Image (spheres, helix red, strand yellow):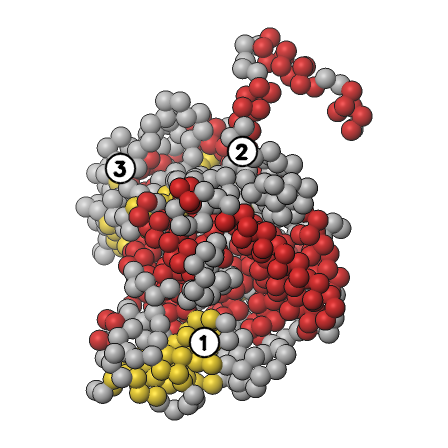
Amino acid sequence: MGILRNWIPWRLIIRRAAKAHGFIDPVSLLARLRQFAQPSEIQEPIELLRAGIVFHARGLINAKAIQQNLDWIWPYWVEKQFNPSASSFIPRAFSISHINLTHRNWTAVGIADMDIYPIVDPRGLITPFYDGWSIDFWILGADGRMHIPSRNETAIQSLITTPNLEIVTTTQSDVGSLTTRVKLEREAGNAVLRISCDARAGDGDALVASIRPYNPEGIQFVEKIRTIRQQDAAGILVNGSDYVYFDQSPADCVLSTYTEGDVLHKLNDADHRHNVHCRVGMATSASIFPMAASTGERKINLHLPMETAASIPTPSSPRPDAAIAWTKAIDGTATLEIPDQKMQFLYNAAIHTLVLLSAKEIVPGPYTYKRFWYRDAALMMNALLVTGFEERCKSQLDTFPADQKNSGYFQSQEGEWDSNGQVLWIADRFQRLTNRPLADFWKPVIKKAVRWLDRKRITNEPKTLHAGLLPPGFSAEHLGPNDYYYWDNFWAISGLLGAARAMHRFGNTTEADKIAQLAADFKSALEKSMAGIPDKQKLGCIPASPYRRMDPGAIGSLVADYPLRLYPAEDPGIADAPVSGTTMLNTARFLMNNCFHDGGFFQDMIHSGINPYLTLSIAQTLLRHGDSRYRELISTVADLASPTGQWPEAIHPITKGGCMGDGQHGWAAAEWIMMMRNLFIREEDNTLILGSGIFPEWLNAGQPLWFGPTPTPYGAIGLRLTPDPEGLSLTVTIMDELPKDGPNRPACRMEARVPGFQRQTVTDFNSPVLLKPA
């Protein structure tokens, strides 16, 4: 293949073919595009191109299916985005791909130990199977009027977390009201999606349950629909494989194909067909259930078997029901008790989101991002670790070595260089928080990962600002075109420091010292690079790369401050230090002054929206450096959460709906957990800082505050703060024995820094310590 690539003039052939058909020369165009980036061995990751092609292929189908069929009932995002009077409207003149850019919001239900994620959109549209078709409910009035949830301006939606995850959606109009409840359960050990729909309207009206050939991303083909009308069962069979069972028989079931139009327009027709086949793949059905004449109400229950016969376990390996599985998964983990009900709910929802998305392979989302990245996994596992999910994290961590390449590279997608540092960092974090050693099979894995980092560095260009750094890479955090991103290098240095600690634990001090020296050399090269950036370019901050001005991409450089803590929060007093607490705080303040919208960080690159988890990253830096505005950022992120307690990856500045990524983003949930934990207990060198982020209004409410138990490098603790007439009573509860100074766990120093109270070193455990007002 290499010989063919060298001997056949592919570029000339492509150029001539393009010009012969009147197209622009793609080779020249691609060369021009690449001039915006630093020369890189990987220009565009194949994984990203593949995902983009799939994504926009759906968008092309949407363009063909939707805009000339606006008399259909469409999902909420289409009803809004295609409505010229709505703030969500997007013109389509030169957009050949129509995708959801305004309301990427959905929430998954599921069981703690299963990676099956049915999703529900903001108006109650239910997509049972991954990237599949959907179920919608309407009310058909006797006078022809209809109640259609996706066209409703408002809805009431909530997430119930105990005893099982359940999403409740209520919509109401002058025709009637609909309430749906959706949850995943186990029956005889097998996963079953349970849906109930409670309709209230008038005499002569009817409830309609409809199979829809789309989901929150767009069209999803339904080619075949067959009604099930047996003595002991009624329902629908979709595409010959997916069963939808009703607990009662409908009065009628109407079927339609694309050429006949949406079944919406046939609801009053007599249809005696029991099956249809649509060559376009847009078949629809409507099962009709008349309201009770005496009450004007109707309630129906649906259940959908979610597993194939091959995926159902044998009777010898039974599985607990959903409620027991959730209780078992969350038992003993860190709890939060604060008087702010919204933030309390968001914490509880975030815990359930992380458990749900780590049922098998850890993924950052239930739908669009239902795939693995080391970056998201490391940050989600960090939150799982501090809340006590030790075994869950160990099982995830021990799968990493099997996917390491022979070169030592942990590849999430080609052209990203941050993953080796992230794997080494989270492996070290696991050891430090649990005081458990890594298995012996990690020894060669760590050595190979370290060698890859060492070899990957640029060592043959000593007079450049990128000397000693990793090569240009595709931006892991959507920082822009390929460049020498400090983000990658900060992760690498932190990973090397973690690898050195791991080797010390293995008893290989010689290897540990070599890795520590490599980390020191790497850090020196990075600091030399930053010192060489002209002052008028860096403005006392840290740009995204040595060749970038200050812009939103600088958010990536804050990783050195949080979560990596590569530099002390309090300046060491070195005036000309290229990196210090001051430069970190300056970077955060630059971003706040120049890259914020409506109180949150607005990432112009790719995301083009308000990013919740990056806003919380800035809040963490403000908290660490004593800037009280972290509270404003936390409140903004809380207000941006959906009614079900979720955040998409990025949020549309006008609609406040999702405009990027998955509608339920695991990284965002992880950062909310880390934020709440660090408000109570955060780590600095060999010190635990207690209560430094507590909101004053929480104390003014007059009730005790609590967080714990949370693992720390010094043992697991809980922190209780109780308002006292003479000040504030602070109690540190020891959840396990705090070890004495040793090679694996250093001696612990605790310092209370509650806003409005005097700083105090805490030495009395399990008994109250009174803090005096400042």
Q: What element carries label 2?
A: loop
Q: Is mark 3 on a helix, strand or loop?
A: loop
Q: Which mark is residue 468?
A: none
Front in this rendered view, residue 602 or 355: 602
Count of marks overlaid on the render: 3
**Residue 498, located in which quarter of the rendered image?**
bottom right
Q: Dot 1: within a 10 Å radius of its alpha carbon, few (fewer than 14), some, or many (20 or more) residues?
A: many
Q: Quadrant of the C terminus?
A: bottom left
Residue 258 in sight from this viewpoint: no
- Is 417 on the left-hand or right-hand side of 682? right
Three-letter amino acid code at disc 2?
Ala
The reply to whether the C-beta atoms of the residues labelled 2 and 3 are less than 8 Å apart is: no
In percent of the image, x 30 and y 46: which residue is there?
597
Q: Residue furthest top?
A: 20
The reply to whether the C-beta atoms of the residues labelled 1 and 3 are less than 8 Å apart is: no
Q: Which mark is residue 87?
A: 3
Circle 1 or circle 3, nearest the eye: 1
Q: Circle 2 is placed at which residue position?
A: 37
In percent of the image, x 52 and y 50: which residue is there?
487
| First of labels 1, 3 by sequence position | 3
Q: Dot 2: within a 10 Å radius of its alpha carbon, few (fewer than 14), some, or many (20 or more) residues?
A: some
Q: Which residue lies furthest to the right in this view?
A: 3
Front in this rendered view, residue 748 or 716: 748
Three-letter amino acid code at disc 1?
Leu
Circle 2 or circle 3, nearest the eye: 2
Q: Quadrant of the N terminus?
A: top right
Residue 6 in sight from this viewpoint: yes
- Residue 554 rendering spot, x and y as whole percentages: 44, 47
| First of labels 2, 1 by sequence position | 2
Q: Distance between the residues labelled 1 and 3?
A: 47 Å
